[in-house]
Image: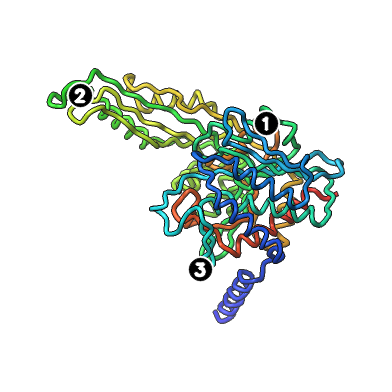
């Protein structure tokens, strides 16, 4: 018992030392550059109503100031959406390999001032944190990518392939002029590449102050929204009828709430559980290893899927997100509608999802129709080049940190690049707390320490992926 106790204390001390070991961060001049870029981006309102053209022009000015030739920095603006500008910069290489494209979005979601402790459109430093809308999603990454490509140019780095960075419009709410989609359709030559890195699709997690893992996203669920609608002739509220569309809609929504789609494990999901098992113990670890096996047991899958975090990787999900009905306080409703947003496992046909919804709600008087159609997004094949590069950089900064493959539940602009045949990988070194994710939320923030590390991580990965 004494020996076991001594070993336990030694391991605890080793873990503490490892957790507190000094992590490489960017040099002071690059940290100052990164902070300046982040401040400028955060303090430029790029919500849907304002657009991203002002930010794109500001980024172009910073890149020209850094010495990039005007021909290599392009602001591309859709003629029918003049506020939805995109900026693209190219660092020329030897051409030994085809280009690598880095993408990030300039736009952010709304941030009502009354809901925030600080002004969301001012970069505020407080208690080791940087607050502001977009600091995490994803202007912190945008600043890191800009700082990295500027740093490479300052160093006279001659990559073996062109490095293209595109900061684009309208990835968030709105979506009427998505920059990546528009560029691929109308200016593909500006961004065509053999490989895409999208920090928006990646993540890096901490818990209780300890770094836990870094994600490589190789796939994401397909996003499609359906509308449920019930109608009736209406009437006066003093004469209620059983055909009330609001009640009818409520009943079918309750059926949908109780339904779970069947488990469907992709290759990415199996690889994720195999790698994630190393971070777990006991039954959870055993069930994750079982899920990664060729013929997992139904009992193990059921236990895993009971955890909502695990279930996201295991099955299609559909959830009610909006509801409306009725036309007057004293009138029986003539119509009631609900939006059902589904995140579909890649490879499952969306037509079958619509048919499943109709079967589950089990009411011929409630119609099911597509409200927002899908953007197909196939899985990107595992890339040894990317995996080796990421693991090498991770090991140089956070030795022993697990690197996990992942299929994201959320959507990103990688859906468009994958659809266009460009293998795309979500990789991000900006750590956030698993239990306090503030992306899209009130008082969005990033750690000053983590931002310094992200500046260095992005630079090292950008350089590693373009070495001769």
The image shows residue 369, relative to residue 43, as above or below, that is: above
x 45%, y 26%: residue: 371
Circle 3 — which element?
loop
x 31%, y 27%: residue: 336
Observer able to see residue 283: no
Q: Earlier in the sequence, mark 1 or mark 3?
A: 3
Which residue is denoted by mark 2 in the rendering?
A: 242
Circle 1 — which element?
helix
Disc 1 packing (10 Å; few <14; some 14–19; many ≥20): some
The Cα atoms of the two marked residues, 1 and 3, are separated by 42 Å
Mark 2 or mark 1: which is in front?
1
Q: Residue 134 appears at what percent x and percent y? A: 54, 50
The Cα atoms of the two marked residues, 2 and 1, are separated by 51 Å
The image shows residue 252, relative to residue 167, as above or below, that is: above
Evaluate if marks 1 and 3 touch, with contact meaning CB atoms under 8 Å apart.
no
Circle 2 — which element?
loop
Which residue is denoted by mark 1 in the rendering?
A: 184
Q: Nearer the viewer, residue 421 or 309?
A: 421
Q: Nearer the viewer, residue 61 or 267?
A: 61
Residue farthest along the top direction in this orientation: 233
Q: Earlier in the sequence, mark 2 or mark 1?
A: 1
| Left/right of residue 254 with respect to residue 437 in the rendered view | left
Residue farthest along the left direction in this orientation: 238
Disc 3 packing (10 Å; few <14; some 14–19; many ≥20): few
Residue farthest along the bottom direction in this orientation: 2
Which residue is denoted by mark 3 in the rendering?
A: 127
Mark 2 or mark 3: which is in front?
3
x 70%, y 59%: residue: 456
């Amino acid at each position: 018992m004494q020996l076991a106790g001594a070993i336990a204390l030694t391991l605890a001390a080793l873990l503490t030392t490892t957790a507190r070991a000094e992590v490489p961060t960017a040099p002071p001049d690059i940290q100052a550059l990164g902070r300046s870029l982040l401040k400028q981006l955060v303090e430029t309102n790029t919500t849907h109503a304002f657009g991203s053209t002002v930010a794109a022009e500001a980024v172009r000015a910073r890149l020209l100031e850094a010495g990039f030739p005007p021909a290599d920095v392009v602001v591309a603006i859709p003629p029918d959406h003049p506020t939805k500008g995109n900026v693209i910069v190219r660092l020329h290489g030897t051409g030994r390999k085809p280009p690598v494209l880095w993408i990030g979005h300039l736009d952010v979601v709304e941030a009502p001032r009354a809901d925030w402790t600080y002004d969301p459109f001012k970069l505020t430093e407080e208690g080791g944190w940087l607050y502001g809308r977009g600091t995490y999603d994803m202007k912190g990454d945008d600043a890191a990518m800009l700082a990295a490509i500027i740093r490479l140019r300052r160093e006279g780095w001659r990559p073996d392939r062109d490095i293209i960075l595109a900061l684009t419009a309208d990835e968030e709410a709105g979506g009427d002029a998505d920059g990546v989609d528009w560029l691929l359709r109308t200016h593909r030559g500006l961004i065509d590449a053999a490989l895409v890195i999208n920090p928006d699709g990646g993540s890096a997690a901490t818990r209780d102050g300890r770094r836990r893992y870094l994600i490589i996203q190789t796939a994401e669920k397909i996003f499609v929204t359906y509308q449920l609608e019930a109608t009736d002739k209406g009437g006066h509220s003093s004469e209620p009828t059983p055909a009330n569309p609001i009640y009818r809609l409520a009943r079918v929504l309750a059926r949908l709430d109780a339904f779970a789609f069947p488990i469907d494990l992709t290759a990415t999901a199996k690889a994720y559980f195999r790698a994630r098992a190393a971070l777990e113990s006991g039954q959870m670890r055993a069930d994750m290893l079982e899920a990664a096996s060729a013929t997992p047991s139904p009992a193990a899958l059921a236990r895993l899927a009971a955890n909502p975090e695990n279930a996201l990787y295991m099955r299609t999900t559909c959830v009610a997100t909006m509801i409306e009905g009725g036309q007057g306080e004293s009138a029986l409703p003539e119509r009631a509608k609900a939006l059902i947003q589904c995140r579909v496992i890649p490879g499952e046909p969306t037509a079958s999802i619509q048919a499943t919804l109709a079967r589950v709600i089990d009411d011929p008087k409630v119609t099911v129709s597509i409200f927002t159609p899908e953007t197909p997004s196939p899985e990107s094949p595992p890339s040894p080049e990317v995996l080796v590069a990421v693991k090498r950089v991770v090991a140089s900064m956070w030795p022993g940190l697990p690197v996990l493959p992942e299929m994201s539940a959320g959507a990103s602009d990688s859906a468009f690049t994958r659809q266009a045949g460009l293998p795309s990988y979500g990789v991000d070194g900006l750590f956030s707390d698993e239990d306090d994710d503030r992306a899209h939320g009130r008082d969005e923030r990033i750690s000053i320490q983590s931002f310094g590390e992200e500046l260095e991580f992005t630079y090292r990965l950008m350089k590693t992926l373009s070495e001769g």
